[in-house]
Amino acid sequence: MSYQLLILIPITVEIQTLDEGWPEFLNAAEKMPGLIRESVCRIDQPIFGQNFLRRIYSFSFETKDHLEKALLSPPGEKAGNILHRLTQGNMILISGEYKEDYLENIQEKPS
């Protein structure tokens, strides 16, 4: 189990500006203390319902406390300011507990 920060980028964000500035953001974000993993989902098609997102970025930390300390750290504050500038404040930040399992661990085993 870990704790994740999710950055939801809506389709209304100017993607060229975001892409050009993303290395600057990552340079700051990757220096946040306690960061253990990052990932991106580039949304290419909705399967059901109305899509309003272009990208979902995930940053994983060991605990909620680690995440909070990372966000308040100088690199975290710098990353936040860069993100705000790149999106003009048009983003959604959410956090929560993250659990993952492999199918072989949850499937019924033959007796």
Image (tube, grey):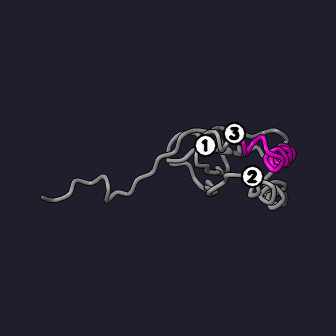
Task: Give the dominant element type of the magenta stretch: helix, strand or loop.
Answer: helix
Distance of label 2 from label 1 (alpha carbons) = 31 Å
**4 to the left or right of 47:** right
For mark 1, give the secondary structure. loop
What residue is pinned by disc 2?
32
Query: Which label is found at residue 68?
Result: 3
Q: Nearer the viewer, residue 21 or 74?
A: 74
**57 to the left or right of 101:** right
The reply to whether dot 3 and dot 1 touch (C-beta < 8 Å) is: no
What crowding class fits label 1: few (fewer than 14 Cα within 10 Å), some (14-19), or many (20 or more)? Answer: few
Query: Which label is found at residue 51?
Result: 1
Query: Residue at (66%, 54%) from the top-left corner?
Result: 35
**Span colored in magenta:** 68-86
For mark 3, give the secondary structure. helix
Residue type at numbered disc 3: Glu
Residue type at numbered disc 1: Asn
Q: Earlier in the sequence, mark 2 or mark 1?
A: 2
